[in-house]
Image (cartoon, rainbow, N blue to C red):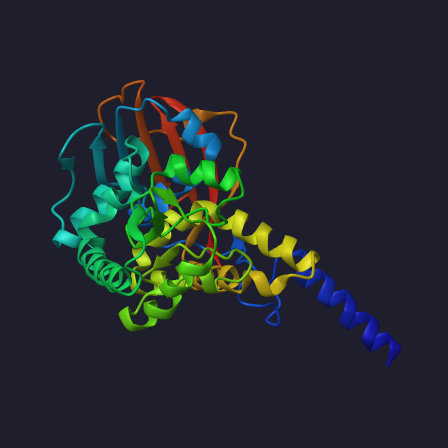
Amino acid sequence: MKRFIGLYLIWGAIVQACGQVPQSLPSWQGNTCDSTRRVTSLSLYDLIIPVYKTDSLREQTVGINRVLAFVNDEQGTPHFLGSHRSGSPTDSLPAPTSRLDSMQRHAYFTALTEDPLYLYTRWAWLLDTTRQVFMIRRDSLVDSLRRQLSSYEIRVISDLRSAELQTRLLGRGRSMAPISFHQLGLAADLGFFRRGRLVRNAGPYEAIGDLTPYYQLVWGGNFVGFVDPPHFQLYRNAAAFLKDFPLLRFEFEPFYERYQQRVQQKIEANKEFEVEDTKELLSVLNEYRSKFPCPCQAIQVPDTSRYTLPNMPRPGASDLVIVGDLKDQRLSIWRGSQLLVAYRLGIWR
């Protein structure tokens, strides 16, 4: 019996050492990239996201003029997925199957060439109707507050927010969200003023919490771990938002490790209750990742001649070329004729 238990424990250690994720792990604890499983197809998302989410690569792509994406099939034949030139209103793309397909491709490509003032701008084609719903509810809420609290001047003091401002607020501890609903146009902050001065005591802001349920909005005063009385938003949390807009996982993926780190820190501090929303977000991201391609690890390639570019005119020094190779199971990223990095492909599980 002891021998059997010993063998069982050894086998369990081997399984975990090979990267197998025990079934008992919570759904928010990460997927692993399994390079033993063969990738059979690659989308534009699969090619663009490794660059978009990796700070070191983003630094090497500053000033790029054009992005081109290719997939080499199992026989080594290249297939052009599309391109985008910085500052160009149109893309050089295969004929899209729908407007949604065209706009989605445009959003992915421009993420590498252009930084809009507001993240909402990149996704307005998808979020515009939802933002209009939020704005109608926001204005109705403000009108009700003005009628109930006529002794105050009530203003919207924060609506759309830039990524730069969100980063500053994170650094000052005035926000806990790497991606804020303000950046997506689905949140607002109100200010109550008397004699021209902002009221900072919580009293009048509790009226926001009383009224938000009637307008199907969520009050920041009920947040756990980071109470924000002037704030309200359309969605309960980021996980609920992504279930309606799975394409926007593109914007949340770059912060995946930060979300994981925050949960671990709160667990160690015995404050896991403060990050239930973050755990739910990670679970949704893991669900979307599952069974899709991933770049497992960077490969050292001393001989870059093995990574020939597809049959095309020689790219300029400021062109970014991304090639997914199903035959060799590699993803290579070039700037001009310089190989920046090559990854071994795998499958999330």
Q: In the image, what residue occupies the spot 69% across and 56% down?
A: 269
Left-right relation of 206 to 146: right
Q: In the image, what residue occupies the spot 24% across and 30% down?
A: 311
Q: How many marks?
A: 0
Residue 177 can be seen in this image:
yes
Quarter holding the N terminus is bottom right
Q: Residue furthest bottom?
A: 1
Left-right relation of 12 to 135: right
Left-right relation of 317 to 101: right
The location of residue 180, given as percent across then percent down, is 39, 49
Q: In the image, what residue occupies the spot 56% across and 53% down?
A: 260
Query: Compared to 203, does 53 lie above or below?
Result: above
Query: Compared to 188, does 29 lie above or below?
Result: below
Left-right relation of 93 to 23: left
Q: Residue furthest right?
A: 2
Q: Nearer the viewer, residue 223 or 40?
A: 223
Question: Which picture quadrant has residue 68?
Answer: top left
The location of residue 25, given as percent across then percent down, is 61, 68
